[in-house]
Image (cartoon, rainbow, N blue to C red):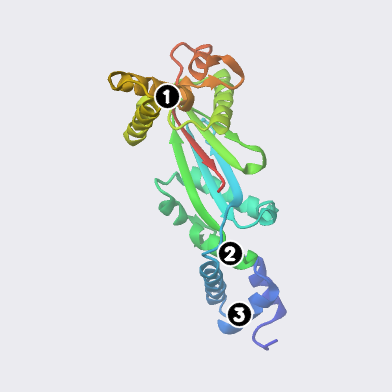
């Protein structure tokens, strides 16, 4: 080892960055002992790794949902990787949790803004790049969702494979717990919107067209095809909008009627659902 780069220097850089001993030694040599430059060298190594593996699929990972202490703000962050082995590692899970904490603390508007947030002297985006260099696998912080409401209930699916935030227009301890049941409903039934008013018009148009074509193929008279298509659309709303879905814990009621048990004016204002893949 060079006389100017001691084993203690290598150890210090390793503790700073978590990179391997040989990588730290090479980075310090290249940076002529300058620690800031050495960190940049290691980051560049991560960037090269990331670019080299850009064509790989990152379908594994960790999804984390957090809500503020007053339960009025919530975030979901997804950190993706290539293998389940990496996703289950304490370092990877810890990093995702820290990213979620930063997201909740700063509450940025976009993923791009989140990646600029400071994380121990570097941007969160640069810290992700460092992680790529350490683990040598494609890693992306590719999803960030935020939600504000009178009360937010979170749900994280087993193994951090999915996360949900449900916002409601009323607040109480009982409503929070009820909201968690609704969040589990979202994870299980994957609604496309809170109610029919929230369904994108392009989806509505598509469902109407599908309904008409199905009716024609069944030989129905042209004068009633529109009515049949609208009936099929209403069925779509019932099955795919949250408030109108059958409640998974009691098929005799809808999600909307379940919420009315807590407060006759209680409803869901919005939800966010993030899954792996």
Q: Which comes before the other along the chain, label 3 or label 1?
A: 3
Q: Is residue 82 above or below residue 237?
A: below
Which residue occupies the extreme front position in the image? 219
Is disc 3 in contact with disc 1, using a CB cutoff of under 8 Å? no
Q: Is residue 124 left or right of residue 17?
A: left
Residue 135 sits in which quadrant? bottom right
Mark 3 or mark 2, earlier in chain:
3
Q: Quadrant of the N terminus?
A: bottom right
Q: Residue, x 48% and y 24% (percent of image)?
A: 239
Question: In this rendering, which labeled residue sits more in front, label 3 or label 1?
Answer: 1
For label 3, the SS is helix
Residue 132, labelled with which disc? 2
Q: CA distance from mark 3 to mark 1?
A: 61 Å
User: 277 or 148, which is in the foreground?
Assistant: 277
Rendered image: mark on residue 237 = 1
Residue located beneath label 3 in the image: 28
Left or right placement of residue 84 versus residue 183 in this view: right
10 Å neighbourhood of mark 1: few (<14), some, or many (≥20)? many
Secondary structure state at the residue bearing disc 2:
helix
Please report whichever mark, 1 or 2, sits nearer to the chain's N-terminal start: 2
Q: Residue furthest bottom?
A: 3
* Alpha-carbon span between mark 1 and mark 2: 43 Å
User: Is 44 located above or below residue 190 in the figure?
Assistant: below
Q: Residues within 10 Å of mark 3 (few under 14, many from 20)?
A: many
Q: How many angstroms separate mark 3 from mark 2 (CA)? A: 19 Å
What is the x, y in percent for residue 142?
49, 52
> At x 33% / y 19%, what residue is drawn?
227
């Amino acid at each position: 080892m060079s006389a100017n780069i001691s084993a203690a220097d290598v150890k210090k850089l390793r503790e700073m960055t978590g990179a391997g001993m040989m990588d730290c030694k090479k980075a310090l040599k290249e940076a002529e002992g300058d620690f800031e430059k050495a960190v940049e060298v290691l980051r560049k190594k991560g960037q090269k790794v990331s670019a080299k593996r850009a064509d790989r699929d990152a379908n594994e990972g960790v999804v984390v949902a957090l809500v503020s202490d007053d339960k009025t703000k919530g975030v979901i962050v997804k950190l993706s990787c290539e293998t389940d082995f990496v996703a289950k590692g304490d370092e990877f899970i810890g990093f995702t949790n820290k990213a979620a904490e930063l997201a909740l603390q700063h509450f940025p508007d976009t993923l791009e803004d989140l990646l600029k947030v400071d994380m121990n002297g570097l941007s969160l985006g640069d810290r992700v790049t460092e992680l790529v260099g350490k683990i040598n696998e494609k890693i992306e912080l590719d999803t960030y969702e935020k939600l504000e409401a009178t009360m937010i209930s979170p749900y994280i699916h087993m193994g951090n494979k999915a996360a949900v935030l449900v916002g409601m227009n009323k607040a109480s301890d009982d409503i929070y717990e009820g909201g968690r049941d609704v969040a589990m409903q979202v994870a299980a039934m994957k609604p496309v919107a809170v109610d029919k008013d929230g369904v994108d018009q392009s989806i509505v148009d598509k469902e109407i067209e599908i309904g008409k074509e199905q009716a024609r193929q069944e030989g129905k008279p042209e004068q009633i095809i529109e009515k049949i298509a609208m009936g099929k659309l209403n069925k779509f709303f019932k099955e795919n909008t949250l408030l109108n879905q059958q409640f998974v814990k009691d098929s005799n009621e809808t999600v909307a009627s379940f919420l009315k048990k807590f407060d006759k004016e209680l409803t869901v204002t919005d939800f966010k659902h993030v899954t792996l893949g």
